[in-house]
Image (spheres, rainbow, N blue to C red):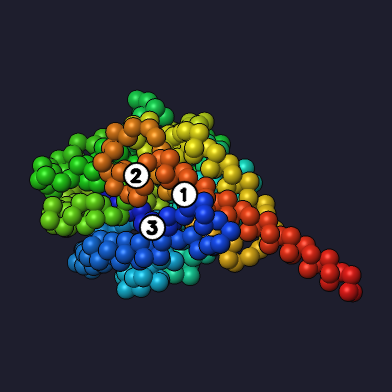
């Protein structure tokens, strides 16, 4: 059987909060930095989404279906593309129409809801599936959680929602001596197939490409040296043109690499879902504790590793019941962007081995500044939610008396 090569790109744009001070509370309920959101999305669309989508479309047409890729795209990213870069969203739709591009489901808000009990996670996934069906005409059967967070229990929940495959990190502390370049099965529901990220080759493109040391011929040698059946390259899509600028030759590298893989004997491209379906699991993946693709530890401490993060996270999800009771589109909108994992990442205090790349996306000067800004917004939102609930109860009581 041929060695299957998969490229899986993650597209996400958080809604960035404006500087929101204590004195704004009770007066200002507009929490977003709209100019920053517009500027970032339009810049990334111009530097990454549009040129890279055009390149992918060109290669799909050139190789007549022999080249395939998978995408994860958050609902928050799609919402912003609609407003600020509709031409980029249209280019994603053109890719979907080729039949060579798989859209993988995830958390609509790019949240950490899979770590919380209750139905919030399932509701977010349902919203993401509906969005993918509406925008791209696909019903996803593959799932990739926020930041590739995975555990046996999370995989079981994903399987219960009807997904056939899930993508996560090929973490050494979970795999031990085993290779990431095979398909595995979930420990609690072995019907769910697990595709693992080859972090070495993925990071060579996303983090280590600049400087000219890596080219398509060398990368083909590395691919040939892998001893498994499926090699999954999973990375942020902004690798192309944003993190690794066009001047590094990243687009030319990708074009050359695809051509060499297509021409090579014993190699083929597939979407992640196709690869998971085509290859039998070689064993069960045991992962009792949540892992992710972040830093050397490959755990969740990038988002929930200190007191600031845990306090903010607890306070956020304490609001969940009241937000659900209101059923308000306005409050649901705020609830969604406040859940994004980025908000908690900005509060991280640990040292990252890939610190330069991580710092790139952090708009705050310190973890404490991120925490204070977030908590000011959250506190004001909580007050408004409670006020709206009281008004709703009073209106219902008045209606009952009138009747």
- Is residue 13 shown left or right of residue 217? right
| Rendering coords of residue 36 (x, y %) | 35, 61
Instruction: Read off the residue under disc 1.
Output: 373
- Res 72 → quadrant: bottom left
Instruction: Read off the residue under disc 2.
Output: 365
| Rendering coords of residue 379 (x, y %) | 58, 50
Q: Nearer the viewer, mark 1 or mark 3?
A: 1
- What SS does tag 2 mark? loop
Q: Is residue 297 visible?
A: yes
Residue 37, compared with residue 318, is above or below; it is below
Taking the spot 34% from the left edge, 70% from the top edge, the residue there is 85
Taking the spot 71% from the left edge, 60% from the top edge, the residue there is 389
Residue 26, compared with residue 312, is above or below; it is below
- Is residue 176 shown left or right of residue 386? left
- What SS does tag 3 mark? loop
Q: Identify which residue, 190 or 294, lies in the foreground.
A: 294
| Rendering coords of residue 333 (x, y %) | 54, 62
- Mark 3 and mark 2 lie on one chain; the one further toward the N terminus is 3
Dot 3 crowding, Cα within 10 Å, few <14, some 14–19, many 20+? many
- Mark 1 and mark 2 lie on one chain; the one further toward the N terminus is 2
- Disc number for residue 13: 3
| Rendering coords of residue 335 (x, y %) | 56, 56
């Amino acid at each position: 059987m041929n060695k299957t090569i998969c490229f899986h790109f993650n597209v996400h744009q958080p809604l960035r909060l404006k500087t929101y001070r204590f004195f704004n509370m009770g007066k200002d309920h507009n929490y977003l930095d709209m100019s920053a959101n517009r500027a970032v999305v339009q810049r990334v669309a111009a530097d990454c989404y549009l040129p890279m989508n055009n390149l992918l479309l060109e290669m799909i047409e050139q190789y007549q279906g022999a080249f395939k890729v998978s995408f994860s795209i958050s609902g928050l990213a799609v919402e912003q593309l609609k407003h600020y870069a509709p031409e980029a969203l249209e280019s994603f739709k053109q890719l979907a129409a080729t039949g060579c591009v798989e859209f993988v489901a995830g958390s609509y808000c790019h949240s950490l809801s899979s770590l919380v009990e209750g139905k919030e996670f399932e509701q977010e996934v349902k919203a993401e599936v509906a969005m993918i069906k509406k925008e791209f005409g696909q019903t996803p059967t593959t799932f990739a959680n926020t930041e590739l967070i995975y555990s046996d229990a999370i995989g079981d929940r994903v399987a219960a929602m009807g997904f056939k495959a899930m993508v996560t990190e090929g973490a050494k502390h979970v795999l031990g001596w085993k290779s990431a370049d095979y398909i595995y099965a979930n420990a609690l529901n072995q019907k769910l197939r697990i595709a693992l990220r080859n972090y070495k080759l993925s990071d060579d493109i996303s983090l280590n490409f600049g400087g000219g040391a890596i080219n398509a011929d060398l990368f083909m040698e590395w691919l040939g040296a892998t001893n498994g059946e499926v090699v999954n390259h999973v990375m942020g899509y902004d690798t192309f043109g944003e993190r690794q600028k066009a001047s590094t030759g990243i687009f030319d590298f990708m074009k050359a690499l695809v051509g060499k893989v297509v021409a090579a004997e014993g190699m083929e491209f597939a979407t992640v879902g196709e690869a998971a379906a085509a290859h039998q699991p070689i064993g069960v993946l045991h992962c009792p504790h949540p892992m992710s693709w972040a830093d050397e530890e490959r755990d969740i401490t990038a988002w929930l590793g200190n007191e600031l993060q845990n306090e903010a996270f607890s306070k956020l999800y304490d609001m969940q019941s009241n937000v659900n009771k209101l059923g308000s589109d306005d409050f649901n909108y705020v609830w969604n962007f406040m859940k994004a994992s980025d908000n908690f990442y900005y509060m991280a205090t640990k040292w990252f081995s890939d610190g330069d790349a991580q710092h790139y996306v952090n708009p705050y000067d310190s973890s404490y500044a991120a925490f204070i800004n977030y908590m000011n917004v959250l506190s004001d939102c909580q007050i408004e939610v409670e006020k709206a609930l009281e008004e709703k109860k009073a209106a219902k009581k008045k209606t009952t008396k009138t009747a």
